[in-house]
Image (cartoon, rainbow, N blue to C red):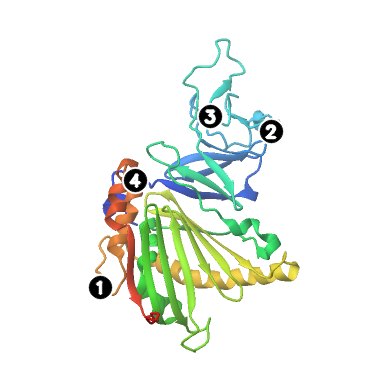
Amino acid sequence: MAKTAEYGLGEYTFPRGWFMIAVAQDVTNKPEPVRFFGKDMVLYRGKSGRVVLLDAYCPHMRVHLAKNTTSYIVKDGEQMEGDSIRCPGHGWRFTAEGQCDDIPYSTHGVPKAACVKSHKVVEKAGCIWMWHDMEGGAPDFDLPAFAEWDMEEQGWVRWRLDHLGTLPIHPQEIVDNMADLAHFIPVHGSKDIVYFENEFRDHVIMQRFGAGHRTLVSDTAEDVLTTDTWYTGPGILLSKMEGQHPSVIMICNTPVEDGEVRVWYALMVKIANERANDAGVSMARSYQDVALDAFAQDFELWKFKEAALNILQVPDDGPFHKERIWYRQFYNPRSRAKEFQDRVNGVHTSVDKRKKPQAA
C-alpha cells in the first residue's frame, strides 16, 4: 500500500494523536511485545495496576525486554519488580519512566544514558490508549469522554472490543469515509438521503447523516435513520445512532507500519433504563454483531482497494478535498496545525432536504 510521503501529507511518517493499542483486560504483569508506528515496544501492567509502555530494546546490548522465555531472570520470576522490568539479558532494571535504576553486577553505579523511552498511556473505556507524537510533545487534545461507559445503571451495556487485525492500507483511506456521501446507497443500503453534512472543528471532524434504509427503518418518508459520527484526532471514530436502542459505535485505526493499520471495533447500546440483566447483555452482543456486519462492508472495500493518491472527484461525492486538508494537521509540526484548521473549519453541507420551519 502507498506510504505517507506518496499522499503528500507532511513531513512526519506517522500522525500525532491518541491511538488504541490494546484491550485493557488483556494487559497483565507478563510483558508483551507490541509494534506500532514502526517501533518495537513492550507493554505490561505493573504491580500497582499502572499500565506501562516502553521501547523494547535495552540500551546496554539491545536485548528485547519481552521476547524471552529461557533466561533464568524470566524463569525464576524475577523480571517484574513493582512497576519496573528487568532485561532478561543482564538484569538491568528499568522503571516505568524508562530510567535504569539498578545494574546488579555494577560496581560503578548506573550511567545517566541508561534509559529507554517511556510512552504516555491511559486506560479508559476498556482500552489502552497511547499518545503518539513524532515531535515528542505532550497531548494537545483530550481523549473522548466515553460517558456511556460509566452509565451501566442507566441501562448501557459496555462494549466488547473486536480486534479485526491489520489492513494493508494507509489510514488516510479509512478517514476518507467521513466525507464519502456517495458510498452509503450502494454499500450500506441507504436510500432517500435527507441530509449529509461535515463539520470541521480544529482536531475534530464530524459527519451528520440522515436517510431511509432498505432494512433498518420502515418505508415511510418520515422514518429516517440518523447518525452523528466524529473523529477525535486521526485514530478514534465514534458514531451515535438514536432509536429504540441508542448506540455508540467505536472504530479505531492505529498505524503499525507506514501503510499498514490495526483496526478495532466496538459498540455500546442502551438496552433498558436500569442495569441490563443477562438477557439484556446477550441482546447487546447480538446488536453489536449485526452492526459489525455493516462495518464489514467498508472493511472489505478497504482491504482490496488500490491507494487513491488522487481522487477523481465529482461535485456530488462529498468534501474529500477538505477532509484531506484537515487530516494533514496531524502529519506536520503542531505549530502548523492552525494553518490547516483555518483552511477548513466550519460546516460543509452536501445534501439538505429537511423541511425548513415556516416563518410566522
Residue at the (32%, 44%) spot, across then down: 12
Residue 210: quadrant of the picture: bottom left
Q: Is residue 193 above or below residue 61?
A: below
Residue topped by disc 3: 98
Residue at the (52%, 30%) spot, across then down: 63
Q: CA distance from mark 4 to mark 3?
A: 24 Å
Residue at the (52%, 83%) spot, across then down: 215
Q: Secondary structure at mark 2?
A: helix
Residue farthest toward the front in the current orientation of the protein: 360
User: Amino acid type of disc 3?
Assistant: Gly
**Labels 2, 1: front one:** 1
Task: Say if mark 4 contacts mark 2, CB within 8 Å.
Answer: no
Residue at the (50%, 84%) spot, across then down: 223
Residue topped by disc 4: 13
Residue topped by disc 1: 315
Task: Say if mark 4 contacts mark 3, CB within 8 Å.
Answer: no
Q: Is residue 151 left or right of residue 348?
A: right
Graded by Cα atoms within 10 Å as few (under 14), some (14 to 19) or many (20 or more), the crowding at tag 1 reads few
